[in-house]
Image (tube, rainbow, N blue to C red):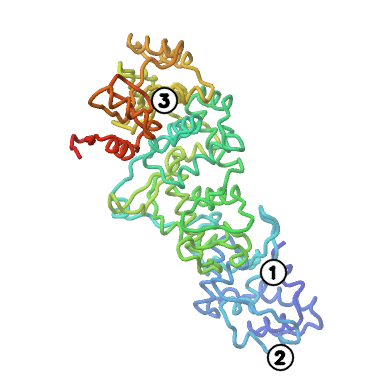
Amino acid sequence: MTDLWHSLIKSEYSYLKIVAERWGFPFSAPDARRGVDQLVHSLLEGDFLESAAENLDKDEWEALVWLDNLGGRSPWDHFTRRFGEVREMGAGRLDRERPDKEPVSTAEKIWYRALIGRGFFETETGPLEFAYLPDDLREALMPALNPERLTGKEEGFLCRVAGPRERKFILPEPVFILDQLCSLLAGIRIGLDPSIHMPEMTKEGKGFYQALAGAAGLLDIQGHPSPDSIRDFFEMEDAQSLKVIWESWLHEAMSPELLLLPGIEVEGDPPLEPLRVRKALLSFLAALPGDEWWSIESFISQTKDRQPDFLRVGGEYDAWFIKDRESGEYLAGFEHWEKIEGALLRFYLTGPMRWLGLTELGAPEEDAQPAAFRLCPHFLDFMAGTSPELPIIAPELVQLRSQGEIRMTREVSRKARYQIARFCDWYPVKAEAYQYRLSPASFSRAEEQGLRVSHLLSLLKKYTKTIPPNLLAALERWEKTGSQASIETRTVLRLGSPAILKSLKKSRANRYILEQLGPTTVIIHPGSEEKIAQALIELGFFVEVEDQTGSQT
């Protein structure tokens, strides 16, 4: 229990006597146990609480209201960082030094009035020490000191509404997360960098998507695609696939987002607990009305004010080794909270939460950093663990041109795009469509991954309106015999007569001749032009070299 009597029951007699003196109560108890009874009776049964506000200074009042607004309790380290320390003293030192007469902090002022208690409470991470308002004292005192408090909503998370300037420019929605995962998985499958189809994705974003794909079982522990899981994933309805992704982020032990922050480097093996951190973030956001724009800076400052230990439980601000990448400085101590916890909160709001379709962002200008956020309608679905309502769109067909060019909009089935993209060279996104091209190199790369062109033919027949006849014939020939022609860049040497070529072949320069094309023409090894020229001069012939622009030397 956390009433006043239980808060005082283990107190020293000297402490009880100081509390009584601070309030001006007579104190005649012969021992500590009866001293607790006498003090509790004097505080709660008399009429002193009606005039208590007159006995408190502004700082004491502020501390009690702040604690009351947090539901009556706060982690001890958090409380003392804000309102100062309470010096540890035994009975003898209390009698000698009388810290109540010259308190070093606001916390010490109210401590020696017995207005706060100190004790351990169970949390999700185990027992944690708190400063708290005794329940019966809080009920009797705080309505007068804190009349604005909304009963039953003390733990609500506060945040400032964003001003019109902070959301003057609304950032466009990011590419749908399922489309991004399709590009990522297809690229990894054939060993291509998927960034060409994820042009706005940062290094940190790519790391998040890859970790998320691993948490969803789409990549194995080595980061290789899991074909069966990917097939099942892309056969789901979009709403079901999105729910799988949400649940993977919330419940699976994917890499902590802290490790993705570009400005810091985490050393050692601290207890990161990413699931607990994500749930703490969601609890803060769930307290905000979803139809309003909120200030990002206010959200961060309110978290620092009310729940600063959401990452490093118990105030372990000197125990973790976190280094600033630019300066190499170790960011020890609470004074670096903004560079670690603050940066992490900003990353969550502007990165993962946005990519997951849970937040919308606003900024003062088009190129400015986001300053405001709003919870998207999907946030309620996410928190309730239900599948979102997504519009049902009839899938479009793949567009295939006779030159081997392929165009796929985002309305094309992701299953089709994932499968076909593995056989193609990739080109930049154009007009909101993914661009590809078929080539011998892309076929060879696919075959190295165990994919056959016959499978591509089946896919094209299924997902395109028609396959151009020339392309169909070329694909069928490739399946039977491979490439029928090649275009290569070679260095050609043309000689004035067959006799000169015969002499050159007898010289030491013969090793630079790769292939004879005719009686006076050969292909030579790239970079051997100077050696060939020296050999021909020794044979009595000048050489004229023509570069790609037509210039001669």
Callout in the foreground (3, 1): 3
Instruction: Give neighbour class at mark 2: few <14, some 14-19, many 20+ (Cα, 10 Å).
Output: few
Q: Which of the labelled discs sits on residue 441, or is there none?
A: 3
Could you tell me the amino acid type at mark 2? Arg
Distance between mark 2 and mark 1 Cα atoms: 26 Å
User: Viewer-proximal residue, 212 or 540?
Assistant: 540
User: Viewer-proximal residue, 207 or 477?
Assistant: 477
Distance between mark 3 and mark 2 Cα atoms: 87 Å
User: Viewer-proximal residue, 337 or 498?
Assistant: 498
Could you tell me the amino acid type at mark 1? Leu
Distance between mark 3 and mark 1 Cα atoms: 79 Å
- Residue 423 percent across, percent down from the top left: 44, 23
Say whether residue 463 is visible. Answer: yes
In the rendered image, the quadrant that contains the C terminus is top left
For label 1, the residue is 4
For label 2, the residue is 96
Looking at marks 3 and 2 on the same chain, the residue that comes earlier in the sequence is marked by 2
Q: Residue at x 75, y 83 (%)?
A: 91
Could you tell me the amino acid type at mark 3? Ala
- Residue 23 percent across, percent down from the top left: 63, 82
- Residue 472 percent across, percent down from the top left: 37, 10
